[in-house]
Amino acid sequence: MLTLSPGALTLAQLRALWANASADPPAVTLTPSFRNAVRASAARVQAATAGDAAVYGVNTGFGKLAHKRIARDDLETLQLRLLRSHAVGVGEPLSARVVRLILVLKAASLARGFSGVREAVIDALLALHNADVIPVVPSQGSVGASGDLAPLAHLCLPLIGEGEVWMGGQRLPAAEGLRRAGLAPITLGAKEGLALINGTQVSTALAIDALLSAEQVFEAAMIAGAMSLDAARGSDGPFDARIHAVRGQPGQVDCAAAYRALTAGSAIRASHLQGDDRVQDPYCLRCQPQVMGACLDQMRYVAQVLVREANAVTDNPLVFDDAMISGGNFHAEPVALAADALAVAIAEIGAIAERRVAMLVDTVVSRLPAFLTPDPGLNSGFMIVHVTAAALASENKSLAHPASVDSLPTSANQEDHVSMATFAARRLAGMLANTARIVAIELLSAAQGIEFLRPLRSSPAVESVLSRLRGASPAMMEDRSLAADIEAVTQLVQQGHLGASIEPREAASAALAALRPA
């Protein structure tokens, strides 16, 4: 059981939810103290329904139809029809892992006590999560303003026994899923439908999912860079702590420390301290702390924004002690800009990794056999493997174009500037898959390069990772298809297995752990 405090969720708690979402998702409960504030907020909404004043979303229509007054006898029908009319999403369903995060974020936001919903609504959201009854939520159809309206409507339809759910690997009508789980549908009260579909929880959950996935890829890219450094017999001078201290960029300082830990004790490096006539290495080796450190700083910024948003109240209107006030917290611009920042970092992690692959296959620069094969000509070696990496890196450049700079007015120009945050966050998964494969290709290339330097051994940290890699992909001394090898190593990258291959007692493991956004 994971107990969360509304307004005080931490990245560590979100990571725990995310990491276990596929295998054994923990049940979630909220600290009981939320109930008093929720009851008071719901009571204020009920009082508003008894009055004569127009209150947006309580006794009026929505968006451009806000001027339409709704009769008191139709207030429940208004919320029901709102949920139904807004459930118009299209495209492939969001992953169960993301939907579980959305359920928890929505419940925690409503539990802040500023939304005017009853406790029963919050309890019903958590009941879906804890019973593993996962709403089917189409991935497309939100512009990231007025809330993630369409996907949140699909998320919440099962609360009233409508829509579809995943349960035990089956896609079922929601009513059947509730019946099997022993759950009953609820009837929405005044404002509750609006509170459920207003908010940034879909774009936020998608961005959190990408950030936590990026941690795994970033760690593997650090390891791959250290391995490539040794395969190319590069200098460790550029990682000297004094260089990075005088610049003072925190991500750069931390990454340089991790590279030093990863390469400590390398016999390959020791063998080239004397007599190497190269004065400087290519930027893809020498500037790794600067590039990866800047990406790390970007990821840390994104983490701060997303944790704030995970704790935020983002529906409208908001219910305060003395008033119900309409505002714009549903506008997901913070998430959009953070997702765009993360997209650039993801693209750069892949871009510099691709450059190291290009360096390794180039015999003039790497001083390794051409295309990393002992018999070039008869064998093509890693020639086309690099082409694949280049294709993926180029694709990421297009995907990194900021989504937040686009806006299409909606709701008859009432909602005339939107964030596009949902797409900004959703497109990150494809970019991460591309970068994970580029890093996998670099790992295979660097491992192949080290084969030509035997019997010299790399550092203990790198050798432990090499051993794990060789379990998935033997050295290639004559041509074979590496497609399956790339996919096998990509799985190791995405699941964080390479960092786990390093013995915990080694300094390298601690240095890598320190790179995760707090």
Image: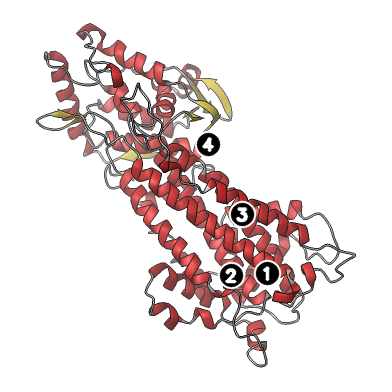
**Sequence order check, earlier mark of 1 and 2:** 2
Can you give x and y, in whole percent of width and height, for residue 200 in the image?
A: 36, 36
Spatial separation of the CA atoms under disc 3 and disc 2? 14 Å
Residue carrying label 3? 393
Horizontal side of 384 relative to 509 (left or right) equals right
Q: Is residue 36 visible?
A: yes
Q: Which mark is residue 95?
A: 4
* C-beta proximity under 8 Å, tags 4 and 2: no
Residue that sits furthest to the bottom in the current view: 274
Q: Quadrant of residue 252?
A: bottom left
Picture quarter with the N terminus: top left
Give the image location of residue 422, x and y in percent: 44, 37
Q: Amino acid at mark 4?
A: Ser
Q: Which residue is mark 1?
A: 359
The residue identified by callout 2 is: 284
Please name the amino acid that badge 3 sits on. Ala
Crowd band around label 3 with a 10 angstrom C-alpha radius: few (<14), some (14–19), many (20+): many
Point out the tag, 3 or 2, that comes first from the N-terminus.
2
Left or right: where 87 falls relative to 192: right
